[in-house]
Structure formats: C-alpha cells, structure tokens
Image: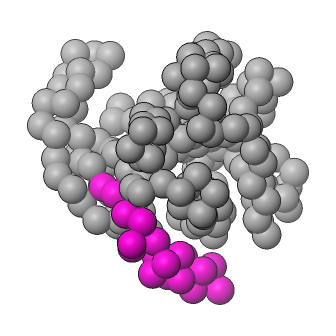
C-alpha cells in the first residue's frame, strides 16, 4: 500500500459495524443492491449484480494503490450487509479525506443505521486520524443525498460545475460539503442527539 495513514479497522456501533471490504462480501453486496434495484438510479454509482465483483476488486485495488479504505456496513439485528462506504480522496499531508461511495439497501435508507455509520466514520476520521477536514460530494440532482449530508451538519463549500462525465456522456455538477475539525464537537453532539 502506498499510503498507510488509514489502516483497515472495524468500527463497532450499537446498530452496525463498519468492516473493511473483502472479496467475500460480493454476494451480500449484490443482495443489498437488489433491495431497491439501486443500480438503476442514473445519478449515483451503485453496482448492478453482474458488476459487483469488479466494483469490489476496483475498491481493493484503490485501497492498495491509493490508500483508500473501502468498507461494508454490517447490520447487527439481521446479521446482513446493508451497504457500502469508504474513505477516499486521501490527502495525508493536509490531513483531509472524503467519505463517499456510500449506498444502502433501499429498506435501510433514512434510518438510524446511516446516522450511526456516519458518526462512526467521522469519529474515526477526526479523533483517531486527526483529520482537519472531511469532505462529502454528491450529484447536484441527488436531492436526497444532499439533504442527508446537510442533516449531518456538513456545510456546502460550493458546486463544481461540469465536474465529471458520467458513463452515458452527461456532465455532472458536483456539490462539495465539508466538516472541519473545529466544527466536529458540535456535529458529534448533534449526531449523538439524533441517535437518541
């Protein structure tokens, strides 16, 4: 691995455990994506069942070559994997990272599982990795994702217009949000309150 700032770690919560992604998780990720046929959402990138193995292999390659850390989200109650997320766009020198590539099976969206997952990831980023900023990015059109990021307490930094081209050739406007180190105590308190 080129960058060892972020080591594989399991983050244990009351409802979920965030676990390092592994090739053995492919079948469970396929099942999670089938819940809502998430790959049909044109403005987000969730692998279809036949693309999931390549998705996981690419995530693991980026872990080894770029220092990213892909995770699966394991729900305790059902003992199932309900989605995926990762630390990426790693900038160890400036102690910044992005939380993204996040998706949940439809039946777990807008639940305490997502809030707790973000609390676990942000706590690790700010309190163990000493990050000075954590970013979130989403498609301008993904209003549900934008509202979810804003509910966390992240602030919008701006919009990168025509930022990236999708597989079908359309340009994506990317909305960039962040939480900075000085904001973390209040954001943490807010997330803990939401989980109560």
Identify the residue at image location x=45%, y=81%: 186
Rendering coords of residue 119 (x, y %): 59, 66
Magenta segment's dominant SS is helix
Left or right: 176 as drawn, with respect to 56: left
Identify the residue at image location x=24%, y=48%: 175
User: Is residue 72 located in the magenta-colored stretch of the structure?
Assistant: no
Left or right: 126 as drawn, with respect to 12: left
Q: Quadrant of residue 76?
A: bottom right
Which stretch appears magenta?
A: 177-196
User: Is residue 179 located in the magenta-colored stretch of the structure?
Assistant: yes
Foreground of the two, 64 or 136? 64
Q: Quadrant of residue 78?
A: bottom right
* Vertical placement of residue 25 versus 36, above or below: above
* Vertical placement of residue 134 versus 190, above or below: above
The N terminus lies in quadrant: top right
Left or right: 79 as drawn, with respect to 148: right
Rendering coords of residue 45 (x, y %): 44, 31
Counting labels gives: 0
Foreground of the two, 99 or 3? 3
Rendering coords of residue 81 (x, y %): 76, 44
Q: Quadrant of residue 174?
A: top left
Left or right: 111 as drawn, with respect to 14: left
Foreground of the two, 46 or 163? 163
Q: Residue furthest left?
A: 161
* Vertical placement of residue 120 versus 141, above or below: below
Identify the residue at image location x=53%, y=57%: 130
């Amino acid at each position: 691995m080129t960058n060892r700032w972020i080591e594989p770690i399991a983050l244990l919560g009351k409802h979920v455990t965030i676990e390092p992604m592994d090739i053995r998780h492919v079948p469970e990720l396929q099942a999670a994506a089938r819940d809502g046929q998430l790959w049909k959402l044109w403005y987000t990138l969730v692998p279809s069942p036949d693309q999931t193995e390549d998705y996981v292999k690419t995530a693991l390659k980026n872990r080894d070559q770029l220092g990213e850390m892909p995770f699966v989200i394991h729900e305790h109650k059902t003992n199932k994997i309900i989605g995926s997320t990762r630390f990426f766009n790693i900038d160890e020198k400036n102690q910044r990272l992005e939380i993204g590539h996040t998706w949940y099976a439809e039946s777990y969206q807008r639940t305490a599982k997502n809030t707790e997952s973000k609390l676990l990831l942000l706590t690790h980023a700010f309190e163990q990795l000493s990050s000075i900023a954590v970013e979130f990015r989403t498609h301008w059109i993904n209003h549900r994702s934008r509202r979810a990021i804003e509910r966390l307490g992240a602030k919008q930094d701006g919009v990168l217009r025509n930022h990236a081209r999708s597989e079908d050739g359309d340009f994506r406007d990317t909305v960039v949000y962040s939480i900075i180190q000085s904001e973390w105590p209040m954001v943490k308190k807010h997330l803990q309150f939401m989980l109560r």
